[in-house]
Each structure stands twice: as C-alpha cells, then as structure tokens.
Amino acid sequence: MKTGYVYLTGAGPGDPKLLTIKALESIKESDVIIYDRLVNEEILKECKEGAELIYAGKFPKNHTLRQEQIHALLGEKAKEGKIVTRLKGGDPFVFGRGGEEAVYLRERGIPFEIIPGVTAGIAAPAYAGIPVTHRDFGGTFAVVTGHYSKQRKKEMWEALAKGIDTVIFYMGMSELREITAMLIKYGKDRETPAAVIEWGTTEKQKTVATTLCNLADEVKKNGLKNPAIVIVGEVVQLHNHIPWFQKEGIVL
Ligand code: SAH
C-alpha cells in the first residue's frame, strides 16, 4: 500500500504573495488540503484540480475535540495514500498547534514535513511600518499569547514589563484591557508607544497606534477586532516614519 505524506504548511499572515515557494509547491501537489479560518482563500485557488478542500473550522468548538478530529483526519487521509497539506495561517509552529500534529504523525509513522511561514506577529507590524527590532529602540522581542492573561504568573508580567523591549501579543484582543493594565502594573511606562494592527498585510489592514495606557480605549473607540496583533514598545513610534503599505485607515 502506498503511504501518504503530510505537509504542515504555513500560509503566511494574509497577503497571498507572502506564501513561500515551498508552501505553494505543497499546495499544488496535494490531494487533500485541510485549512484554517485565517488562510486567505486566494491561496486555495492554487490547489490542483479535483483536490479535496476541508475547512478545519467546521469541527466542534471544543478545542480538544476539534484538535483530535484534525489529527484523526490527517492520519486517515495519509493512510489512504494521499498527499495532504495541513494549511495554517502564519507559521505552523507559532500558536498554530503544528507541534501537536507533528508529534501525532511521528508516533504513527506517517512521513511529514514542516514548511515554516511568515508569522503575523512580525509581518503585521512590518506592514504597519513597525520593525520588531531596531538598534535604537529595541534589541529584544517576545511573542506571547493573550489567552489566559489573568492566570499568568507575576514573573511573566515582570519579565515582559521590565526585561523585554518589544512585546507582541497574538490573540490579545479579548483581554486587551487586562494585558495593558498588567504591563503598567509590573513596570512598563504607561506612555510606552503601543499599537494594534487588525487584518495585517491585507487590504483590510487597520492600525491604531497610541500609548500603552490609552490603547484599550482607542481600540474600542475605533472598533478594531480580531484577527489582530498587539505590539508594545519604543519601536512602535517608527510607524510614523515608515508608512509604506497602509496609506489609509486609522493611524493616530
Ligand atoms: N500561526 C499564526 C498564529 C495563529 S494564532 C501565525 O504564525 O501568524 C491566531 C492569531 O494570530 C490571531 O488571533 C491574531 O492575533 C494573529 N493573526 C493572524 N493573522 C493575522 C493578521 N493578518 N493580522 C493580525 N493578526 C493576525
């Protein structure tokens, strides 16, 4: 029996042209593509004729169950001898559960390959004119999930507030007020430049750039929602000097 093959592929942050050549090749070659919500539909048009496209978001809301079903589906399709692309927004290993899928495949002896992607936490700021590092404004950056902010240890907040120049939150919108308050509480200057970038790298991109203490209010006032990246640090002030992509929209 022919064994299948799985590509765990990053689709990039939104702009379809940020897809890597390897990612494009995996999409063109695959019999089955299992894709996530944030994957730009333009990219799916690159699949071969007759390829089966499966939206992973149709599985149950319960995250554990959904992940189990995706694992099972990957295994099932590969065992049928199919070439499968598991297509994820951004990079598959940055808050993408790609690590769990790779372990699952490895344990079952299913051959696979990881294709890294351009991650939203770096690309969305770049399209908003914000470099995540800069010799004068920031030599360290951290990426953090905004989920469970309330349960995080004070050591994490202290480290982010005092030890890291640029802090980037994924999935930070629902707990934005909490996040900004904790950073200030643990020592980040309330006037630190901070921004939220919604639908980064796409035509719908919108940015709100202000100070840490005003961020939650400004974001609410301007109606920015998910998907969005929250970025805090002196580098954010550069957005005024490098407005190369987003010529319109809200830039405070
Ligand atoms: N693996 C992805 C991240 C998945 S987690 C990556 O590497 O980019 C999903 C979160 O990513 C969203 O809640 C949002 O915070 C962020 N995100 C993904 N695409 C985005 C985009 N185009 N603009 C802004 N944020 C984005």
Image (cartoon, grey):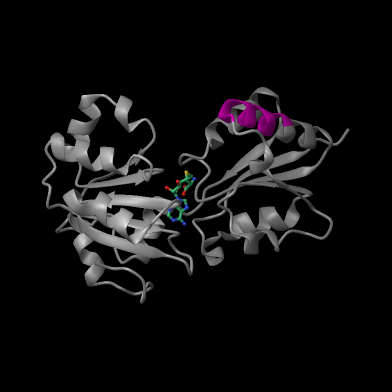
Q: Residue at 63% of width from left, 31% of height from top?
A: 66
Q: Residue at 60% of width from left, 32% of height from top?
A: 101
- Position above or below: 97 against 249: above
Tell me the quarter of the image containing the C terminus. Answer: bottom left
Quadrant of residue 236 within the rendered picture = bottom left
Q: Residue at 12% of width from left, 47% of height from top?
A: 190
Residue that extends furthest to the right in the rendered view of this protein: 1
- Position above or below: 209 against 7: below
Q: Is residue 124 left or right of residue 189?
A: right
Q: How many marks?
A: 0
- Confirm whether residue 138 shows in the render: no
Q: Residue at 16% of width from left, 56% of height from top?
A: 137
Q: Is residue 69 magenta?
A: yes
Residue that extends furthest to the front in the rendered view of this protein: 221
Between 135 and 16, the residue placed more toward the observer is: 16
Tell me the quarter of the image containing the N terminus. Answer: top right
Q: Is residue 224 left or right of residue 187?
A: right
Magenta residues: mostly which secondary structure?
A: helix
Residue 63 pos. (x, y %): 57, 30
Residue 109 pos. (x, y %): 70, 26
What are the residue bounds of the magenta stretch? Answer: 62-72
Between 50 and 252, the residue placed more toward the observer is: 252
Quadrant of residue 195 within the rendered picture = bottom left
Residue 89 pos. (x, y %): 54, 50
